[in-house]
Amino acid sequence: MYQEINFTQAGTAPVAHPHMQQSAWASARIARRMDTETAAWLRASLLPEFDAARSLTGLKRRLADKGFYMSQNNAGVVLRDCHSRVVICTLEFLGVSPRALERRFANH
C-alpha cells in the first residue's frame, strides 16, 4: 500500500491579510455552479502546476503562487481560494486524482 498524504498539514492554509481586497472567487461555490469558460481557464492555469510539481510542498507553493490551496472535506480533496477560503472545486473536477498524487508524492 502507499502512505496517505495529509493535504492540509497544520499551518499550510494561507491566510489573507485583513486589508486585502476580496478575491474574484469570493462568490464562487463548488464546481457545479462554475461556468464552462471559467472551468476551462482554471484547468488550463492549474494543470501545468500539478504536472510540474516534484513534491507536495512544491505543489502547495505553486498553487499558493496562483492564489489557491488544497484542503480535505466531505467532498474529498478540494481547491480553495487563499483569500476568501471559498471551495472552488474538487481535484477530480480539474482532472487530478488525489490517489495518484498520494502515490506520486509518497516518497518525497
Image (cartoon, rainbow, N blue to C red):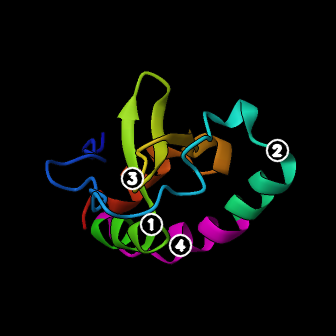
Q: Earlier in the sequence, mark 3 or mark 1?
A: 1
* Residue 101 lies in quadrant: bottom left
Question: Residue tagged by mark 3?
Answer: 103
Q: Amino acid at mark 4?
A: Glu
72 magenta-colored: no
Which residue position holds label 4?
49
What is the spatial separation of the Cα atoms under label 3 and label 1, in whole angstroms? Answer: 19 Å
Residue at point 27%, 62% (across, down): 17
Q: Are marks 1 and 2 in contact (CB under 8 Å)?
A: no
Mark number, residue 35: 2
Q: Amino acid at mark 1?
A: Leu
* Mark in the foreground, 3 or 1: 1
At x 30% / y 39%, what residue is drawn? 1
**Disc 1 to disc 2, how far (Cα)?**
21 Å
Q: How far from the left and from the top, in percent, is residue 22?
A: 48, 55
Instruction: Of the two numbered discs 3 and 2 on the same chain, state the one appearing first in sequence.
Output: 2
Name the residue beneath numbered marker 1: 63
